[in-house]
Amino acid sequence: MKKTIVSALGAAAMSVTAFGASAATLDDVKAKGFVQCGVSQGLPGFSNPDSAGNWTGIDVDLCRGVAAAVFGDASKVKYTPLSAKERFTALQSGEIDVLSRNTTWTATRDTTLGLNFAGVNYYDGQGFMVRNDLGVKSALELSGASICTNTGTTTELNVADYFRANKLEYEIVAFEKADEVVAAYDAGRCDVYTTDQSGLYAQRLKLTNPADHTVLPEIISKEPLGPVVRQGDDQWFNLVKWTHFAMVNAEELGITSANAEEMKNSDNPAIKRVLGTEGEFGAALGVGNDWAFSIISQVGNYAESFNRNVGPDTPLAISRGTNDLWSKGGLQYAPPIR
């Protein structure tokens, strides 16, 4: 029995090593002085560079939050643009420290790739976009359509499931890079564009005439999107996970980037713990006790990030919906810092 246990442990260790996991990611990050963050190749609202190369978006804010927690400086991040096909290999190999790139949490990805999902920073679902002149009002009217999408994602399987269940014919036209999919759809090489519904709203902005296209109402899947790290390093896993939780807790407690300093004077024990004026919660994460204060004051709470990047006052104009706080009918819920 003892020999069997040792063999199993050895196999597990070999598996972790094969995926490039390190039990000291935080030490490595501190030594090089920045977080290497894997992002998309350009998805407005989530991870997208401007003309000067400055990255913004919900996924970017997660990376900035991790940097704020580690260094007290949200700017200490370098970004690696990755296609859907490249993203997991880049993380497994150690090329990046964290993947924050509109990536769906699934059983296979969570158990067979040597990776851990560190939470859900955007609850999404797959949808369809069509040209208005196609005259289609529902996905159930898409029989015989050609459908553009990305390779290396969950979308192809979701399309297959949906069209088979509804006895609809279809043809997939797949590309590796998101911009290739957008260009093909915009050029009329396919009838339909499918990806996460949030992505459809974002990519529609890149089309020649965005107003000529409609996102259909159907949601055909659950797409919980969130940051990913390598297995085998619980401290780094915890730090990335609690970066997101800190932003959600801050929203619930009314702590914002504008009032975080003032809120240090609060008598509310929950606020004091989040801002580091009570307790020693940073030590277990390997960072300073003001880790959450740094995140909130420099990046903002979850609502600030959502509204700034994808909210009603942005070109994407996405309502909070399922991404609202649990106390307001949404799904965003964070364990307490205590």
Image (spheres, rainbow, N blue to C red):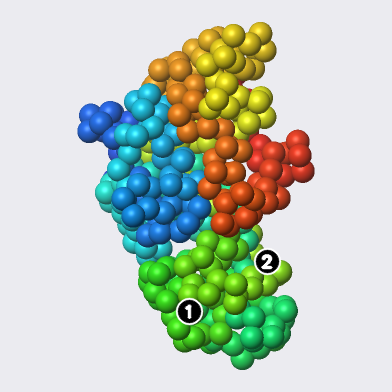
Give above or below for 232 relative to 47: above
Give above or below for 231 relative to 290: below
Residue 5 numbered mark, or none: none
- Label 2: how many Cα within 10 Å (few below 14, some 14–19, many 20+): some
Q: Quadrant of the N terminus?
A: top left
Point out residue 306 in the picture as x, y percentages from the top left corner: 58, 44
- SS at mark 2? loop
Foreground of the two, 105 or 53: 53
Point out residue 204 in the picture as x, y percentages from the top left corner: 53, 68
Looking at the image, is mark 2 or mark 1 nearer the viewer?
A: 1
Foreground of the two, 46 or 262: 262
Q: CA distance from mark 2 to mark 1?
A: 22 Å
The amino acid on which the numbered mark 1 sits, given as a three-letter code, is Asp
Label 2, on which residue? 219
Task: Say whether residue 25 is left or right of residue 269.
Answer: left
Give above or below for 201 relative to 334: below
Q: Residue at x 55, y 71 (%)?
A: 210
Point out residue 185 in the picture as x, y percentages from the top left corner: 48, 79
Label 1, on which residue? 186
> Mark 2 or mark 1: which comes first in sequence?
1
Q: Residue at x 71, y 69 (%)?
A: 217
The amino acid on which the numbered mark 2 sits, given as a three-letter code, is Ile
Q: Quadrant of the C terminus?
A: top right
Q: Are marks 2 and 1 in contact (CB under 8 Å)?
A: no
- SS at mark 1? helix
Q: Quadrant of residue 223?
A: bottom right
Total numbered circles: 2
